[in-house]
Amino acid sequence: MVSLRNILALSLLTIATISNTVSAQSGMLYGVFRSDNGCILMSLSPDTGDNTTIANVDICDKATNGLFPSYSAYDATNNALIIAIQSAPDVYSVDITTGKSTSLVPLPTYNSSDFLLGLQLIKNTIYVVTQYHVYSAPLSGASSLTDLKVPLSAPQYAQVATVPTGGSGGAARLFIADENSKAIYIVDLGAPTAKVNSISSTIGGTILLQYSTNVNQLVELLSYQLYVTNPNTGKSTKLNSVPDGSGYPRVNGLSPDQSSIFIIDFDKMFTMSLKDGTVGPFFPFKGAPRVVGFPQWVAA
């Protein structure tokens, strides 16, 4: 069974606020893309759609069973992408100026029964989420991941996002949305005893889960429809339909101010406002068709 999560038909875009304020949406997207000879680090301009190859990277050569699922986060301290590939031995850091990769910490050995669901970076701590485990490690200096002993039993296909508040003592919470039902599992990272709560979304089958601190809601994509969802109640509100394209729209992340998302659909890229669903201008996507993890939009 092929999950829509693994259909990475990608690209990106530009300013999608009503005022088209360049200063709020400027910066550059960075991603590790699959190429004919391995993988390359690319930058993508949200203002023009131009794609630039920065360097070859070697992390894809280390994966033993394909490049998906894979996940990424942006490390502002070291100006690097943090990337986890299910069948690779380690979590890697890739410098976005040089493409140099560094092994950070070993991943659990993939055994075909505990799928990698996500990677999150919260206050310089890496969190790796699988079907049955939540692991953590400091961004530097760790020799192994620590199993947080969370009693998690998640589906094979799910999306993971971080809500930075709402946990015990003001801690962050991990949200894990089932791609095939309305269930959203919640892990309180501040709880003295690990436990999993859940809510039911009013929609189901999401292929995207993000959290925007700009609108303070989860962001979900389902069947070419963009929604925001209250993380406390599960109530979802439709913002707009996602423009159809030649591939499948894969929402890859939030703008630096988290007021919009960018979408790559094979040969075009665009943004949508998270306030009212306004669709920004379209740019042609001229880069590699598949990305490892997700491009990260880095502020100028």
Image (cartoon, rainbow, N blue to C red):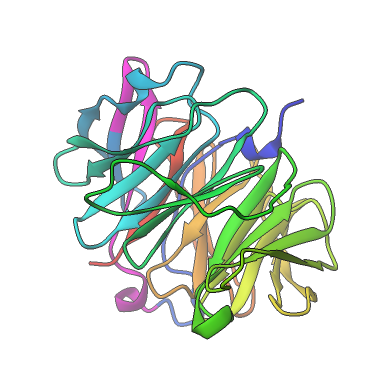
Quadrant into which the C terminus falls:
bottom left
Q: Mark yes or no: residue 243 visible.
A: yes
Residue at image location 82% in from the left, 56% down from the top:
204
Residue 218 relative to residue 60: left or right: right
Residue 36 lies within the magenta run: yes
Picture quadrant where residue 47 is located: bottom left
Residue 38 image point, x, y percent: 33, 19
Q: Residue at x 48, y 31 (%)?
A: 290
Q: Is residue 67 above or below residue 181?
A: above
Answer yes or no: is residue 215 visible: no
Does 265 lie within the magenta span? Answer: no
Relative side of 172 to 209, left or right? left
Q: How many marks?
A: 0
From the image, which quarter does the N terminus lie in?
A: top right
Residue 9 x %, y %: 56, 36
Q: Nearer the viewer, residue 55 or 170?
A: 170
Q: Where on the picture, by quarter, is residue 15? A: bottom left
What residue occupies the far left of the structure in this picture? 98
Front residue of this view, candidates 214 and 141:
141
Residue 225 image offset from top left, x and y in percent: 74, 59
Name above or below for residue 29 compared with residue 239: above
Look at the image and give the residue range highlighted in magenta: 21-40
Q: Position of residue 70 (x, y in %)?
A: 49, 37
Residue at 46 percent across and 73 percent down: it is 258
Residue 134 or 254: which is nearer the viewer?
134
| Residue shown at the point (51%, 17%) measured from the top left | 65
